[in-house]
Image: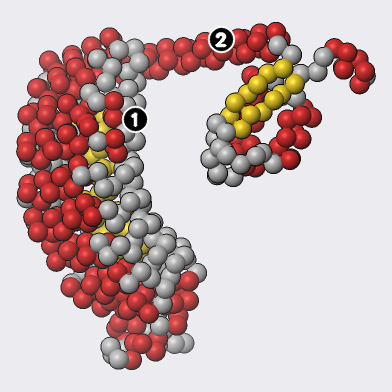
């Protein structure tokens, strides 16, 4: 039976790649480790997503050196979590990012590693190299990671540089100084990152000055019109004044798609809740489905205002996770939310039936219907035209075919006209 010094063993639940890295780090000197890259490379080539956890700094350093010498363009996601990081490990990994050997990387998560400014600056330097332009999801920091102004400013420079044009999800947690968050929010306001869908700044120091910049960016920048999640949980420096200032952005049309709002564990009280209730009652944030605001001071006055928002705005179906003053408030809110959901479903079904009858009547009155589908520029394939001509789909059924038509036509933008002719009674008789 092989000894533990001759082969990696799974004694702590780590995956095979983590075992290989740590075993190589524990059993061979720095110069000898180069000869034992083959099994690590083989493991990397067999995966598109890797998770590195519970290894020492020298194990991550080995991974970084291997990636510097061996490109892995198929690698889409890298997660580095709960590792005992020091300077060398993260620096070696960032060098691999900077040389472009992870050219297909779409998601990078480095969290719960007790990082500081030094590690964040190294990551920012790699991302700012311009070799990570495919990155879509970036998660940095946690409540165990502590960043100061210098580290946050280095990250802000990357966001402002335009080297992450496809970024959709951004999470930066653990920034303890407001100047750092102010720099990040100003970088977002610079509009160099388009199409952001999720922002997560849990546990960061955000005061009135930084909130004002964030609210201005959310309110006026068209790049945030697709934002579906904003999480400010645990930002204890945010109180009523900060929430009221942020609410100015929630009145913007940019926020109509916001789906999830995290305001839990803030220093927010009655005034903040009253402002939120006023927004919801007026019909702002129409797409909101989840509101998290626990560990905040929700008084009876603010609770009544939230209940009134459900009563007055029958389109309000947001699931509020808040600390209600009593179970009576909780039950009333839940019952009203269910009532509004039922009303919306009935309205939707009625509208669909009405449109369906109109479409059928229109198709009966015209022998030939022209359907315009403004999606692709190239001409439709012969197979698609054959299906349309053979089955002569009516206008009210064309929506059922669009998904399959898109697959046949590819992604090229264009304008296509489908002429769908219905059979006359004479043609039907002739066929029969």
Q: Quadrant of residue 326?
A: top left
How crowded pointer 1 is (Cα within 10 Å; few <14, some 14-19, many 20+) is rated as some
Q: Which residue is mark 1?
A: 257
Q: Nearer the viewer, residue 297 or 79?
A: 79
Taking the spot 42% from the left edge, 12% from the top edge, the residue there is 343
Viewed as shown, does residue 24 lie left or right of 158?
right
Label 2 SS? helix
Q: Position of residue 244 (x, y in %)?
A: 12, 26
Q: Nearer the viewer, residue 362 or 13?
A: 362
Label 1 SS? loop
Q: Nearer the viewer, residue 175 or 104?
A: 104
Q: Position of residue 381 (x, y in %)?
A: 69, 41
Taking the spot 34% from the left edge, 61% from the top edge, the residue there is 132
Q: Where 184 sits versus 341, above or below?
A: below
Viewed as shown, does residue 23 lie left or right of 342?
left
Q: Position of residue 245 (x, y in %)?
A: 11, 29
Taking the spot 10% from the left edge, 51% from the top edge, the residue there is 180
Q: Quadrant of residue 248?
A: top left
Q: Is residue 56 visible?
A: no
Q: Where 110 sits versus 298, above or below?
A: below
Q: Quadrant of residue 228?
A: top left
Q: Which residue is mark 2?
A: 354
Q: Position of residue 388 (x, y in %)?
A: 73, 30
Q: Is residue 4 visible?
A: yes
Taking the spot 41% from the left edge, 77% from the top edge, the residue there is 70
Numbered badge on residue 98: none
Q: Earlier in the sequence, mark 1 or mark 2?
A: 1
How crowded pointer 2 is (Cα within 10 Å; few <14, some 14-19, many 20+) is rated as few
């Amino acid at each position: 039976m092989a000894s533990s010094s001759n082969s990696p063993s799974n004694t702590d639940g780590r995956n095979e790649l983590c075992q290989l890295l740590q075993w190589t780090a524990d059993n061979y000197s720095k110069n000898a480790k180069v000869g034992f890259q083959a099994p690590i490379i083989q493991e990397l080539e067999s995966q598109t997503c890797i998770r590195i956890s519970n290894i020492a700094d020298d194990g991550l350093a080995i991974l970084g050196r291997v990636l510097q010498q061996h490109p892995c363009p198929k690698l889409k996601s890298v997660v580095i979590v709960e590792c005992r990081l020091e300077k060398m490990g993260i620096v070696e990994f960032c060098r691999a990012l900077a040389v472009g050997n992870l050219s297909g990387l779409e998601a990078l998560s480095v969290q719960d590693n007790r990082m500081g400014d030094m590690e964040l600056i190294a990551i920012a330097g790699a991302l700012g190299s311009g070799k990570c332009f495919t990155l879509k999801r970036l998660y940095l920091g946690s409540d165990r990671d502590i960043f100061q102004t210098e580290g946050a400013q280095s990250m802000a420079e990357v966001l402002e540089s335009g080297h992450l044009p496809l970024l959709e999800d951004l999470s930066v947690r653990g920034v303890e100084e407001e100047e750092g968050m102010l720099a990040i929010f100003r970088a977002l306001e610079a509009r160099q990152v388009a199409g952001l869908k999720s922002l997560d700044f849990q546990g960061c120091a955000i005061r009135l000055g930084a909130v004002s910049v964030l609210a201005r960016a959310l309110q006026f920048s068209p790049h945030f019109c697709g934002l579906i999640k904003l999480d400010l949980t645990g930002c204890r420096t945010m109180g009523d004044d900060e929430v009221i200032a942020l609410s100015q952005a929630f009145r913007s049309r940019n926020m109509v798609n916001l789906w999830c709002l995290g305001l839990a564990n803030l220093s927010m009280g009655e005034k903040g809740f009253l402002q939120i209730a006023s927004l919801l009652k007026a019909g702002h944030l129409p797409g909101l489905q989840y509101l998290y605001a626990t560990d905040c001071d929700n008084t009876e006055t603010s609770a009544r205002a939230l209940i009134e928002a459900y009563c007055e705005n029958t389109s309000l179906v947001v699931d509020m996770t808040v600390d209600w003053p009593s179970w009576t408030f909780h039950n009333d809110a839940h019952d009203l939310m269910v009532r509004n959901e039922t009303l919306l479903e009935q309205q939707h079904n009625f509208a669909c039936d009405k449109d369906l009858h109109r479409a059928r009547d229109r198709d009966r009155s015209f022998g030939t219907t022209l359907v315009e589908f403004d999606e692709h520029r190239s001409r439709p394939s012969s197979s698609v035209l054959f299906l349309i001509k053979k089955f002569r789909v009516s206008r009210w059924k064309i929506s059922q075919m669009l998904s399959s038509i898109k697959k046949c036509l590819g992604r090229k933008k264009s304008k296509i006209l489908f002429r769908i002719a219905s059979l006359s009674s004479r043609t039907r008789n002739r066929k029969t």
